[in-house]
Image (cartoon, helix red, strand yellow):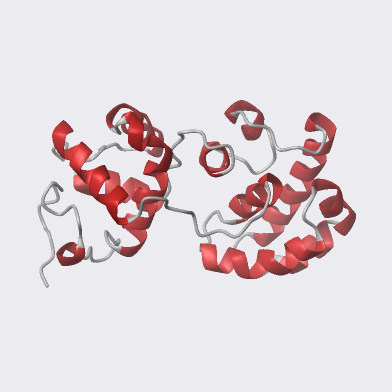
């Protein structure tokens, strides 16, 4: 796949920015802890499905101490509609204990410390760092991976390769929101089965050869 030209990368993000100046993720949360738990639960699940489960869960427990008091069995009951719910419930309890033991109940603001928590990988850490701590990180999910490769923005064979190239190619002034723009673009326009090229704001700079027509 040919890479998008540097000048076109600027155009690409400027148009996405013009359309949605302050993009937001679709998970519902009101603290660093509830965000962390929601993202851990979102692996291989939809944001809508996660929100449906975490609404009642967070009313019952929205701090590490409250989550531990709730217990793994009850957490599992709240999240059983989410894929891999047994293991995820176990991770939520374990990371709650780790937060209390290592960080005084607070969510840390470094990737290294976040990745040391149960159920937290690089993608989850990047989401928390970006959404809560306003750090210019990029979390490569399936949507972002597809858009980066399909458009020629940042082709790569692995999520880490795509993330690394995006960090080099995304203009600094767009880095904070790049993660959200790309995910939302992939979710609603540059869709997996059939990209909606006629409705795409950046189709003229996209390097995808098999563009769809109206």
**Residue 160 occupies quadrant:** top left
Q: Quadrant of the C terminus?
A: bottom left
Which residue is drawn at the image coordinates 73% and 56% (left, top)?
A: 89
Q: Is residue 5 visible?
A: no
Which residue is drawn at the image coordinates 62% and 50% (left, top)?
A: 40
Q: Going by the image, does 46 lie left or right of 212?
A: right
Q: Going by the image, does 187 lie left or right of 67?
A: left
Residue 44 or 185: which is nearer the viewer?
Answer: 185
Q: Going by the image, does 178 lie left or right of 190?
A: right
Residue 61 or 135: which is nearer the viewer?
Answer: 135
In the current view of this chain or complex, which residue is farthest to the right? 69
With respect to residue 112, does 31 lie above or below?
below
With respect to residue 197, does 163 lie above or below?
above
Residue 79 or 30: which is nearer the viewer?
Answer: 30
Q: Quadrant of the N terminus?
A: top left
Q: Going by the image, does 15 lie left or right of 184?
A: left
Residue 171: image x %, image y %? 29, 31
The number of numbered discs placed on residues in the rendered structure image is 0
Residue 175: image x %, image y %? 38, 35
With respect to residue 76, does 172 lie above or below?
above
Which residue is drawn at the image coordinates 22% and 45% (left, top)?
A: 12
Q: Is residue 203 visible?
A: yes
Residue 177: image x %, image y %? 41, 43
Residue 58: image x %, image y %? 74, 61
Residue 80 or 186: which is nearer the viewer?
Answer: 186
């Amino acid at each position: 796949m040919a890479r998008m030209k540097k000048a076109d990368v600027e155009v690409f993000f400027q148009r996405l920015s013009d359309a949605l100046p302050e993009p937001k993720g679709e998970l519902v949360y009101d603290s660093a802890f509830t965000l962390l738990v929601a993202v851990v639960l979102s692996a291989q699940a939809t944001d809508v499905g996660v929100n449906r489960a975490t609404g009642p869960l967070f009313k019952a427990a929205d701090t590490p101490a409250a989550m531990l008091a709730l217990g793994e069995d009850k957490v599992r009951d709240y999240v059983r509609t989410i894929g891999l719910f047994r293991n995820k419930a176990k991770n939520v309890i374990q990371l709650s204990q780790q937060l209390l033991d290592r960080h005084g109940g607070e969510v840390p603001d470094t990737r290294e410390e976040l990745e040391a928590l149960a159920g937290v990988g690089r993608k989850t850490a990047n989401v928390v760092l970006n959404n809560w701590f306003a750090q210019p990180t990029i979390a490569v999910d399936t949507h972002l991976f597809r858009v980066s490769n399909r458009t020629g923005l940042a082709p790569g064979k692995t999520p880490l390769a795509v993330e690394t190239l995006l960090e080099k190619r995304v203009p600094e002034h767009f880095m904070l929101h790049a993660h959200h723009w790309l995910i939302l673009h992939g979710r609603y326009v540059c869709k997996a089965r059939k990209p909606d090229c006629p409705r795409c704001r950046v189709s003229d700079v996209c390097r995808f050869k098999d563009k769809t027509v109206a």
